[in-house]
Amino acid sequence: MTTVLVVDDQPLQRYGFRMLLDSVPGTEVVGEAAHGTEAVRKAAELRPDVVLMDVRMPGMDGIEATRRIVATGGRSRVLVLTTFDLDEYVHAALRAGASGFLLKDARPEELLAGIRAVAAGDAVIAPALTRRLLREFARLVPVGGDGSEGDPRLGALTDREREILVAIGRGWTNSEIAARFVLSESTVKTHVGRVLAKIGARDRIQAVIFAYDHGLARPQAG
Amino acid sequence: MTTVLVVDDQPLQRYGFRMLLDSVPGTEVVGEAAHGTEAVRKAAELRPDVVLMDVRMPGMDGIEATRRIVATGGRSRVLVLTTFDLDEYVHAALRAGASGFLLKDARPEELLAGIRAVAAGDAVIAPALTRRLLREFARLVPVGGDGSEGDPRLGALTDREREILVAIGRGWTNSEIAARFVLSESTVKTHVGRVLAKIGARDRIQAVIFAYDHGLARPQAG
DNA sequence: CGGGTCGTAGTACCCCGGTACCACCCGCCG
DNA sequence: CGGCGGGTGGTACCGGGGTACTACGACCCG
């Protein structure tokens, strides 16, 4: 059961969300708040899985409330929901630690899918916003050379072996790798063995360390 | 009617996509390609609304094909679809001009929603990837404590256990830890077991990952 | 005093990971 | 044509890792 705290200054809007969420199995609205201050308090008190947060509100707005809720370190994740797709809102919300940003004109199933994704630890962005975000991202991310160059051991790996190394870096077991890549476990063992030999690791643990030290693995809280 | 070009080196995979897309009203598969070169040619010839593009292919890969298709300036939009969520793939695909990036383990309705969104000029990112992308974005865009601090699981560890976790993060075996700390291997096993339980790791590999993600382990030359 | 936490240590058991070795298919190239 | 590298697959073996459970001394605190 996914517990949700609905934050919006308009009672009618809150009512709509409650009706929608309570009508589907698996989600439950455990509380409501009409402004930021109340949202922070209730989030700490109710510890919901997801906080559905409006941006524009009298008093403390949704961005500041998001920042405070995230800062508490609780497991509540904030899904920001607004009618305005202003870039400033999006950037501010994401910097504040929001796990998602959707528009209020989203279809009900999109909202539900978003809530489920956020509750699962993933993140969501409204498609209309994703486009602009990606354009900015592509602009911000430097071309190529991310400093991982130089180690000849990386070059010695084949494409497949590099993929296997990344999988090892994710902490996957041989059987998990086999499942994801649609291979037999024997094949995975063969690949893993070659990777270990090529990078000079005695076991997969040191391969994980190698992957992190060379930028092949990225933080992935779960 | 949304027209789709399916690009994948595996015939069975293409068949699956065709069955799925042709089974729903509003989308139609107008062509298939088995590798990048064919994809570029058919995209120019068929001018589909959406190109469903696999990354890993013999010959020209999906990234390069995406770049060329986008470069033609046609109205075709590319939705990259892969089994592997390598960050390098994502970055490369987005820089190449892809309008979306989904994983092959996506549910059918997610894929269909993605195709519709891309055809409409929006963009989509798999929720599991969005999370990492947002984190990078928040890092690239100025300011902001990235909220990685304050994991309650770290506080739950005793001093000794934290030392053990650091040792695990270095890649040491139980016997090495025992030697360095002057303990019996049994004691080390007990500590390791408690560390794993407290941080929620199923084995020491995930403990290594946890250590890196929480700054307990640092890149070590050599 | 009793109770809690922490660090230490042990035994028993099972499974996964790693190694060694072999085998087949494919595409590429001399 | 033959050779070769890369990817895939198999068998057999064994040692380390992880779990479950128990135990005891040191220490602190009410």
Image (cartoon, coloured by chain):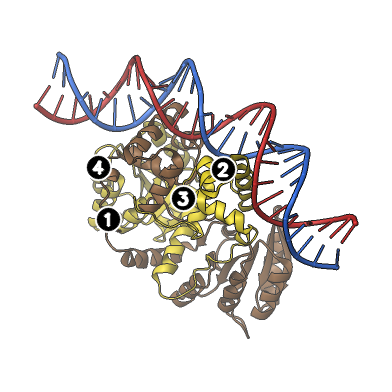
Chain colours: A brown, B yellow, C red, D blue
Which numbered tag is attached to residue B60? 4
Q: CA distance from mark 4 to mark 2?
A: 39 Å
Question: Does label 1 or label 2 sit earlier along the sequence?
Answer: 1
Instruction: Please tell me whether mark 4 or mark 2 is closer to you in this view.
Output: 2
Q: Contact, CB < 8 Å: mark 1 with mark 3?
A: no
Left or right: residue B104 versus residue A55 is: left
Question: Does label 4 or label 3 sit earlier along the sequence?
Answer: 4
The residue tagged 2 is B203
Q: Inspect the image, locate mark 4, and give the three-letter code of the amino acid beneath it.
A: Met
Of B4 and B69, nearer the camera is B69
Q: Inspect the image, locate mark 2, and give the three-letter code of the amino acid beneath it.
A: Asp
Circle 4: element type: loop
Screen quadrant of the C terminus of chain A:
bottom right
Which numbered tag is attached to residue B70? 1
**Residue at mark 1 shares a chain with residue at mark 2:** yes
Chain where mark 2 sits: B
Establish if B194 lies above or below B59: below
Instruction: Please tell me whether mark 1 or mark 4 is closer to you in this view.
Output: 4
Whole-percent x, y for residue B141 in the image:
40, 72
Whole-percent x, y for residue A117 in the image:
57, 55
Q: Inspect the image, locate mark 3, and give the three-letter code of the amino acid beneath it.
A: Arg
Circle 3: element type: loop
Of C21 and B141, nearer the camera is C21
Establish if D6 lies above or below A39: above
Q: Inspect the image, locate mark 1, and give the three-letter code of the amino acid beneath it.
A: Val
Residue B31 visible, this angle: no
Question: Does label 1 or label 3 sit earlier along the sequence?
Answer: 1
Question: Does label 2 or label 3 sit earlier along the sequence?
Answer: 3
